[in-house]
Image (cartoon, rainbow, N blue to C red):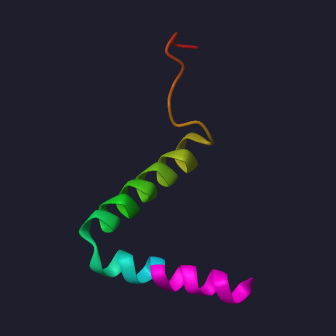
Amino acid sequence: WCIEAAARIREGMAALQSDPWQQELYRNFKSISKALVERGGVVTSNPLGF
């Protein structure tokens, strides 16, 4: 299963380097991850304000 996982990683990295849509998706994931860390978990606030 390690060989299969490594192949999936290679495919993902190749797509990331060549596909603008994949690059935008990665940037979105990066922004979401950063917001999660900054907020200490949940990114969205409670709609009722508490």
Asked whether residue 6 is drawn in magenta, I would say: yes
Residue 27 spot, x, y in % from top left: 36, 60
Outermost residue to the right: 1
Give the residue displayed 50% in from the left and 30% down from the top. Answer: 44
Residue 41, position in %: x, y? 62, 41
Establish if 49 lies above or below 31. Answer: above
Majority SS type along the magenta span: helix
Residue at image coords 46%, 49% = 32
15 is higher (above) or lower (below) than 2 = above
Q: Considering depth in this image, is 38 or 21 the residue closer to the camera? A: 21
19 is within the stretch colored magenta: no
Count of numbered tags? 0
Q: Could you say where residue 49 lies in the image, as x and y percent from the top left?
A: 51, 13
Along the viewing direction, whichever of 9 and 48 lies nearer the viewer: 9
Quadrant that contains the C terminus: top right
Q: Residue at x 52, y 37 (%)?
A: 43
Residue 5 picture quarter = bottom right
Identify the image quadrant of the N terminus. bottom right
Instruction: Give the farthest residue toward the bottom.
Output: 3
Q: Is 37 on the left or on the right of 11, as rendered?
A: right
Relative side of 22 to 45, left or right: left
Q: Is residue 50 above or below residue 16?
A: above
Magenta region: 1-11
Q: Which is nearer the eye, 22 or 43?
A: 22
- Residue occupying the far left of the picture: 20
Residue 5 in the figure: left or right of residue 1: left
The residue at 28%/80% (across/down) is 18
